[in-house]
Amino acid sequence: MDISLQQVGYLYAKDTPFEKRALHDVDATIHSGSYTAIIGHTGSGKSTLLMHLNGLLKPSEGSMQIGDTKISAGTKTKGLKDVRRHVGIVFQFPEHQLFEETVLKDIMFGPMNFGVPEAEARERALELITLLGLPEDVAEKSPFDLSGGQMRRVAIAGVLAFKPSVLVLDEPTAGLDPRGRKEIMELFYMLHKEEALTTILVTHSMEDAARYADNVIVMSEGTSVMSGTPKEVFGNAEQLSAYRLGLPQAIKFQRDIERLLRRTLPDLALTEEQLAEMIVKAVQEGGPSC
């Protein structure tokens, strides 16, 4: 499902004394099957943009196309329920959204709300419990008796249960330790590949954007200011700095190593693994500095 935004603007409390502009002139295209990272400093408009992606907010200006549904400022939109069925959002701290008495019921709630028969919803829920690496016996437990990491996986399963074709992740690793962060991000990447999802990651982590995304959109002061592949975006350190953003650690290390080796490595390393491979190759090749 392709998503495109044309000159999208948004005003909170529009036409009141408390009116505040959050977005202006946002242009972006997210292609079906892609993994797109949206990055930007705090207050850049990332969260407001995210809530437009399944119709939780409608543009005050401009228009959006989400699959076959067009959402334009100042017009009524039909088909928003269908959009929300296809676009699932995992918010920060999704475990705070848990509410049912058992894990099974919590995961089943979403699909049943969209008209999926109870037996089919149950089957989906049990499949997701296994897929997300949860113990089989959690199904009949209260979600509030689980560990924090398990609660987060249950909440994620509740979003995946209605089989969205677009998965929007809002800082999904917030509050997790490094090991938990890596496990959750690898889980989402596996789901992206195996389920052929369109994945949109809203993040402060330059490392996650570089490692997982194939397209990056940069937000600043409420508008989209850069877009491209991770190498295109993170290869422009000066421009990113102007938007108060840094580089992934792997690229910072690469620049330091290039100074030590007195040569420029042949490509931009987006991860530590890529950097290690390039360093080994550069040392083996030796030769004059360049």
Image (cartoon, grey):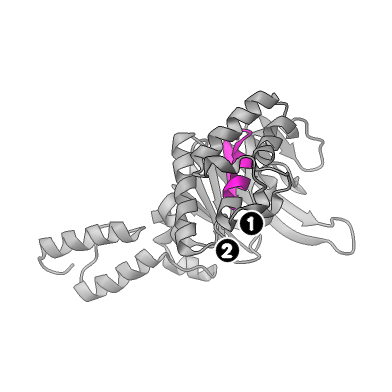
The x and y percentages for residue 288 are: 11, 68
Q: How many labels does the image show?
A: 2
Q: Are marks 1 and 2 in contact (CB under 8 Å)?
A: yes
**Numbered range of the magenta stretch:** 152-169
* Residue 49 appears in the rendering: no
The x and y percentages for residue 128 are: 55, 37
Residue at the image point whose x is 57% and y is 51% from the top = 150
- Which of the two residues, 7 or 276, is positioned nearer the viewer here? 276
- Which of the two residues, 49 or 240, is positioned nearer the viewer here? 49
* Residue 159 appears in the rendering: yes
Q: Residue 221 carries which label?
A: none
In this view, which residue lies farthest toward the right?
A: 16
The amino acid at mark 2 is Gly
Residue at the image point whose x is 42% and y is 56% from the top = 210
Secondary structure at numbered mark 2: loop
Q: Which mark is residue 93?
A: 1
Which residue bears the numbered disc 2? Answer: 175
Q: State left or right for residue 180 relative to residue 126.
A: left
Q: Residue 143: say if magenta.
A: no
Residue at the image point whose x is 41% and y is 54% from the top = 211
Residue at the image point whose x is 71% and y is 30% from the top = 112
**Residue 233 falls in which quadrant of the image?**
bottom left
- Sequence-wise first label, 1 or 2: 1
144, above or below 118, in the image: below
Q: State left or right for residue 249 relative to residue 22.
A: left
148, above or below 3, in the image: below
The amino acid at mark 1 is Phe
Distance (Cα) linking label 1 and label 2: 8 Å
Secondary structure at numbered mark 1: loop
Assess disc 2: are there few (<14), some (14-19) or many (≥20) residues with their C-alpha within 10 Å of its C-alpha: few
The x and y percentages for residue 7 are: 67, 48
**Residue 13 falls in which quadrant of the image?**
bottom right
